[in-house]
Amino acid sequence: MNELVKEWVNKAEGDYHSALREYQARKFPNYDAAGFHAQQCAEKYLKAILQLRNIRFDKVHDLLALLNLCLHVAPELELQKELLSYLNPFSVAFRYPGESATGDQAREAVKAIKKLRPILRKILNLGNTT
């Protein structure tokens, strides 16, 4: 695995742990941030897969666009389309005034990334970590 792929993975892991911390915060949980970091974790893992396989991608935050690129090398990801679709709006929708994620939405985002992360790591031949 080259250094750029490792960097994508490290950033994805940072987002994963940030999503968990924000959702689980006893004081002042930030549900917008929990969902955002869950989405970012999935995005960076998908980009790591693309980078590993030398598949060019643009600077996009659309998980479904990234999924379509990944399907050529990881067709099993088609089964994860629903989870990726759920996470997709968290990249932008809740980052500005007028929209806020609820605790239920954040919980579902965290559940989604907890399901996706081991699958994405397996595709990258990485072990399961906590």
Image (cartoon, rainbow, N blue to C red):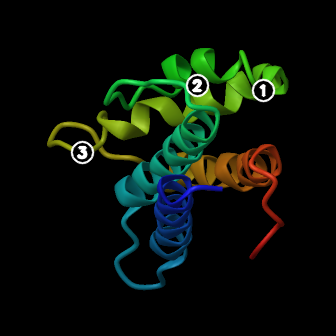
> The residue tagged with tag 3: helix, strand or loop?
loop
Q: Mark 1 to mark 3: distance in Å?
A: 30 Å
Number of marks in the rendered image? 3
Q: Disc number at residue 74?
A: 1
Please tell me which residue lies in front, 21 or 41: 41
Please tell me which residue lies in front, 16 or 76: 76
**Earlier residue among tags 3 and 2:** 2
Looking at the picture, which amino acid does disc 2 mark?
Ser
Q: Is residue 101 left or right of residue 46?
A: left
Q: Residue at x 75, y 29 (%)?
A: 80
Return the residue at label 3: 95
Q: Mark 3 to mark 2: distance in Å?
A: 17 Å
**Nearer the camera: disc 1 or disc 2:** 1
Can you give x and y, in whole percent of width and height, for residue 85 in the image? 58, 25
Looking at the picture, which amino acid does disc 3 mark?
Arg
Q: Tag 1: Cα neighbours inside 10 Å, few (<14), some, or many (≥20)?
A: some
Return the residue at label 2: 85
Using the image, determine if residue 67 lies above or below residue 24: above
Can you give x and y, in whole percent of width and height, for residue 53 in the image? 64, 33
**Earlier residue among tags 1 and 2:** 1
**Earlier residue among tags 1 and 3:** 1
The quarter in which the C terminus is drawn is: bottom right
Q: Residue at x 83, y 66 (%)?
A: 127
Residue 96 sits in quarter: top left
Q: Tag 2: Cα neighbours inside 10 Å, few (<14), some, or many (≥20)?
A: some
Q: Is residue 85 left or right of residue 121?
A: left
